[in-house]
Image (cartoon, rainbow, N blue to C red):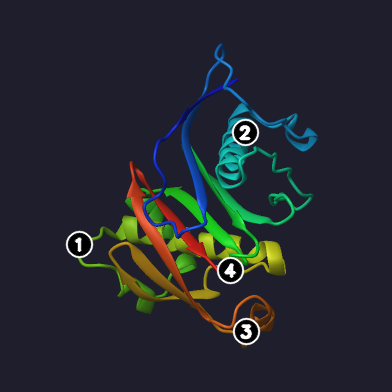
Amino acid sequence: MIRIAERTGPAPFLPEGVAFCGCDFRLDGTSPAPDLPALPASLARAVPKRQAEFLAGRYCAGRAIERLTGSRAEVPIRPDRSPAWPDGLTGSITHGEGYAAAVAAPASLHAGLGLDYETVMPADRAGSLRDLIVTAAELALAPHGMAFASFLTLAFSAKEALYKAIYPRLRLFMDFHAAEITACAPGAITLSISPDRYPALRDLTPSSSFGVRYVFVDDGVLTFLAI
């Protein structure tokens, strides 16, 4: 069993037409959470923590869909573990340490959505992962006063959000150097992907630059973009 406490209010950076739900969750042996979706057979033997993350994320997805359409719908899991959104909708789900969130929008309005939450890394882990996530040129774009570990977590989350937005339509797997940070300001980060390296992107969007919004929440960062 898990306990879910839905957070009130939308994310501050969402464009019109995108519905959002966020919640805090924790494992609880006695208190069932309301309106939980079914646990898929593929997760029947998963550890309780993984099951709780899945259920909290799908709870948020169902609530986001309900806010958008007026009725709740489940979001099954595909064989590749990506969410299977209802026909006519697109969305994104994220979960971290005790926090989950989801966004949904009409597919006619957005070709893809990306939402990601990451707990800020400890400084020593950020140091060991730096070269896997950013280049020296990207690191130089960190906003003045933002701690190194916070910026690296932001870079990781922003790139994750972009890949989440792209993957459902193009089924492209990318490493963390596929997208390059080209600008960073309070609340906004810009990523660019070379269309020459990934020609299939032209089928999704004519732009090679993507604006990602972000906000630091509790001990982590929440990033979002719409294509």
Residue 74 is situated, as x and y percent measured from the top left of the image, at 70, 39
* Residue beneath the point at 62% across and 84% down: 197
Look at mark 4 in the image and give the residue it sits on.
Answer: 175
Which of pointers 3 and 4 indicates the residue nearer the eye? Answer: 3
Look at mark 1 in the image and give the residue it sits on.
Answer: 145
Camera-side residue of 87 and 26? 87
Mark 4: amino acid: Asp
Mark 3: amino acid: Arg
Residue 109 is situated, as x and y percent measured from the top left of the image, at 59, 65
Asked if marks 3 and 2 touch (Cβ < 8 Å), the reply is no
Mark 2: amino acid: Leu
Which of pointers 1 and 2 indicates the residue nearer the eye? Answer: 2
Residue count near mark 2 (Cα–Cα under 10 Å), binned few <14, some 14–19, many ≥20 = many
Which secondary structure, mark 2?
helix
Q: Is residue 96 visible?
A: no
Q: Work out how far the residue at label 3 is from the one at label 2, CA to CA, in angstroms.
A: 36 Å
Q: Earlier in the sequence, mark 1 or mark 2?
A: 2
Question: Of the numbered discs in the image, which one, if any, rests on residue 55?
Answer: 2
Q: Earlier in the sequence, mark 4 or mark 2?
A: 2
Residue 59 is situated, as x and y percent measured from the top left of the image, at 59, 35
Residue 148 is situated, as x and y percent measured from the top left of the image, at 30, 60
Look at mark 3 in the image and give the residue it sits on.
Answer: 197
